[in-house]
Amino acid sequence: MVFEYFSSDYNEARDKFLGAARAAGASIENRLNPNASGPNGEELYTDVARFGPDDAKKALVIISGTHGNEGFCGSGCQIGYLKEGLHQNRSEETALIFVHAMNPYGFANVRRVTEDNVDLNRNFVDHSKPYPVNAAYEEIHRFAVPKVWAGGGLEEANRGLAAYAEKNGPMALQGAVSGGQHTHPDGVFFAGTAPTWSNTMLRSIISDHMSDVDHVALIDFHTGLGPNGHGELILNGDFRGSCERAQSWYNNEVTSFEDGSSTSAKLTGMMCFAFLDVFAPEQLTGIAVEYGTYDVGTVLTAMRFDNWINLYETPGSDLWNEGKKAIRDALYCDNDEWKALVHERANWVLDHAYQGLKTV
């Protein structure tokens, strides 16, 4: 049954993934995050499972958990691929590389961010150069991260955000909050002031596994935007260098914030830049599969709540537990109907990726 591919926590997901990968005959690497631990002090790993020859000229990279507890979804898709034998459908010249729990701290601790409070999918910038400026975030930071949550604090902060949206438009508010910012380490969607461990680790995977590769197909699983259960395919690469090709692979269903067709606001420092720092734009065909859960307001409030409890609340308190449930539920719909939709779309995406790789 499809629901058996999904897990209740990071440890269960890791056990299932490693078991399925071993049974399928993958070569496996376990990369320890030395800077983080689980809620009970346990060690945390990003696990890499590879199929295919060492000198493969094509690679299909499938990533879960870029945004921590969005890994509940992505891990289930990866485990489903392995359990159903879909890894066998790759061509002989293609390496298939699973990266499970790219942000293991966030997955294990039910957080979207890394151990540095960094949004990993905003962290892939050139940290030696001046950072992109998000002036709009400066204006709304005090509302995004109120000092008081209970007793009317949230309502007052929400009024401030609503006023900004009324003045500038809802998409402007979404961009201000979620576009990424480098100035408030305690804020939401903080992009960091140095490469995170997960950033550096992914770059090492690319170096270790793709040095001889001519073309990379990238699938990165996410949740939280769009209609419930729908898997939007958002371009994860250079617009001019890959959008037309991605459209041809994926039945013209690919969206992008570059042309305004996506539910996503414009982002900086996306994970695809780890690949684009190595490969030319025409060598990468990447998508993020973005599964809808709840409306944007509900999801953003849950992210703010999680940020707030980690700043101000005691672990295990009633408010802490309420916040943890909110962020888990906002990014993972733990019901069979949603999981079936996720699974079906994931299999469709994988099949089209295989077919697309045959054309390059």
Image (cartoon, rainbow, N blue to C red):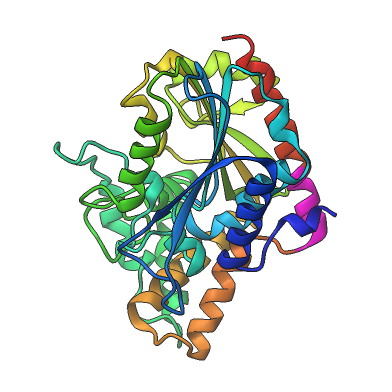
Q: Is residue 135 left or right of residue 230?
A: left
Residue 289 position (above or below residue 309) = above
- Percent of width and height locating residue 112: 47, 60
Residue 103: image location, x then y, percent: 44, 55
> Is residue 50 visible from the viewing direction of this image?
yes
Residue 66 or residue 175, whichever sits in front: 66
Inspect this view and state whether residue 301 appears.
no
Tell me what residue is drawn at x 44 percent, y 73 percent: 42
**For residue 190, side relative to residue 169 (left or right):** left
Residue 251: quadrant of the picture: top right
Q: Which residue is pictured at 68% across the width and 31% down the height? A: 350
Q: Is residue 317 left or right of residue 84?
A: left
Give me the residue at 45% from left, 21% from top.
239
In this rendered view, identify the residue nearer to me: 89 or 132: 89
Magenta stretch: residue 309 in it?
no
Residue projecting furthest to the right: 1
Taking the spot 44% from the left edge, 67% from the top edge, the residue there is 304
Up/down of 49 relative to 144, above or below: above
- Span highlighted in magenta in the image: 335-343
Q: How many marks?
A: 0
Front residue of this view, candidates 318 and 9? 9
Depth check: 243 or 138 in front? 243
Position of residue 163 in the picture relative to residue 345 (left or right): left
Quarter of the image with the C terminus in it:
top right
Residue 23: x and y in percent read 69, 47
The quarter of the picture where the N terminus appears is: bottom right
Judged by its main secondary structure, the magenta piece is: helix
